[in-house]
Image (spheres, helix red, strand yellow):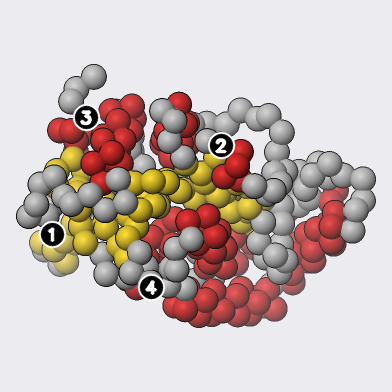
Amino acid sequence: MQNPSDLYRFEIDVQPPTRQPGALIVLLGAFIDAGNIQRILGTHLVDTSHAEVVATFDVDALLDYRGRRPAMVFDTNRWESYADPSMVLYRMSDRDGQTYYLLTGPEPDFQWERAIEAIRQLIQILGITLVVTSHGIPMGVPHTRPVGMTAHATDPRLVGDKESPFGTVQVPASFPALLELRLGEAGRDALGFAIHVPQYLAQAEWAEGALAALNAITDATGLNLPNDELVAKAGVNNREIAAELDDNAEAGQIVSALEQQYDAFVEGQERPSLLATEAEDLPSADELGADIEEFLRNVSDD
């Protein structure tokens, strides 16, 4: 393995930076992030807190540009701008002045083990005590009911009494998942929250889900994180979704069916999980169809 420390560089005057213990929130675009939970939450935290850049990563060594081409703007007869990707580690302070860290950027395509070792080095240097991740997964649930989530951790004590709808499953790997696994093998505390996003909102922005992720991270870390702007954004987002449903009878029927299914499960019908429903209860991808796709395109955070 090449030297992991060559993957990052410190961006502050004192190198290495002053050791300031705190939790690390990792929001690196996962393989699946339904509802754009990570992007909404990461943007919210950076925009509402004082964020000091501690270190940046060499994205040229980690990204497949042809697989995820960054955007460029062409104006008339010239190239005007380029949205260069970045993987950044911030040092932040919550509303009580407590230090915490935030790692944002695209999920690495290459050199996962080396990048994870680089993060482990930074954890050691900075005195990070806990690593927390979050992302969204599509589920057959309605947006009109309490937001569900699946908690996972390197130690059961970090999860507490949170229940999971899953048994043993095999899924495609993601960088945040492997990071949590490797940290656990190294004896470090790490946990994550997979937010259950309604399948019909998987490609849209769902601020309510991001707010649920923020609340879960707050509970796990004890941080007093800013939430006012995200609460307001979730309210606007929910009103937009309601307006779209009012104008789309087919979408409304699907949501109504999901509400009935959810309520039946909560009332204690003989179902081991929300995933173990009768086929006719859960709308298929075909049933979502073109109308739902059009519905999603009309839902925005404006």
Identify the image quadrant of the C terminus: bottom left
Label 3 – label 2 distance at C-alpha: 26 Å
The label nearer to you, 3 versus 2, is 2
Is residue 8 toward the left or the right of residue 175 in the image?
A: left
In this view, 116 is above or below 241: above
Q: What residue type is labelled 2?
A: Asp
Which one is earlier in the sequence, the residue at label 4 or at label 3?
3
Residue tagged 4 = 95
Which one is earlier in the sequence, the residue at label 1 or at label 4?
1
Residue 119 place in picture, x, y as percent: 30, 38
Residue at 47% x, 78% y is 228
Q: Which amino acid does label 4 sit on?
A: Arg
Which one is earlier in the sequence, the residue at label 3 or at label 2?
3
Considering the numbered disc 3 on the image, is that residue within a helix, a strand or a loop?
Answer: helix
Assess disc 4: are there few (<14), some (14-19) or many (≥20) residues with their C-alpha within 10 Å of its C-alpha: few
Residue at 21% x, 62% y is 52
Labelled disc at residue 155: 2
Quarter of image, res 44: bottom left
Which one is earlier in the sequence, the residue at label 2 or at label 4?
4
